[in-house]
Image (cartoon, rainbow, N blue to C red):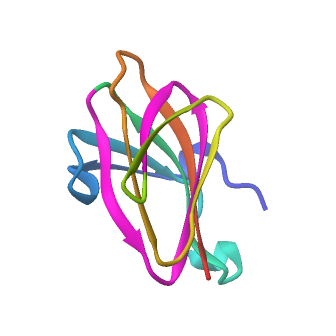
Amino acid sequence: MIRRKDECSVEYNEHLRGGDGTVKLTQFIASPDDLCGKGRSFARVLLNPGCSIGYHGHETDSELYYILKGTAEYNDNGTLKTVTEGDVTICPPGEGHGIANKSEDVVELIAVIVYA
């Protein structure tokens, strides 16, 4: 199967998880069935300067971010860390995270949510 870019849904989420600004999400999957029931999201995320995904927890799933472009501030269970192109963040079940673009450039990442 091939899903063409014009078949992917695009969402603009204002104040995602209590964050700042509007986050653009391009969802690569049509439903969790595309991940064989092993997850619920596989998306490209764009954070313009000043935008963020607010701190939130994961109870029954795990979320990974792969940073494609830019530099961001990652909240890893309350500890702020800088992430940049090529870095991978992992938020396992029972933990929390958030990410903020404090730079003047766009931050682009891939986000994947898988079930525990």
Q: Position of residue 31 (x, y in %)?
A: 55, 73
Res. 104 in view: yes
The boundaries of the magenta stretch are 50-75
Q: Position of residue 75 (x, y in %)?
A: 40, 49
Q: Residue at x 49, y 26 (%)?
A: 71
Q: Residue at x 57, y 70 (%)?
A: 92
Res. 30 in view: no
Q: Position of residue 77 (x, y in %)?
A: 42, 60
Q: Residue at x 28, y 36 (%)?
A: 51
Q: As drawn, which residue projects farthest toward the front? A: 79
Pick the residue in front: 96 or 112.
96
Q: As drawn, which residue projects farthest toward the top? A: 104
Q: Quadrant of residue 58?
A: bottom left
Q: Position of residue 9 (x, y in %)?
A: 46, 54
Task: Describe residue 17's horizontal placement relative to residue 112 as left or right.
Answer: left
Residue 61, magenta (yes or no): yes
Instruction: Locate the C terminus and report the quarter of the image it occupies.
Output: bottom right
Q: Most prominent secondary structure in the magenta stretch?
A: strand
Query: Eyeballing the image, is 59 above or below 12?
Result: below
Q: Residue at x 31, y 42 (%)?
A: 52
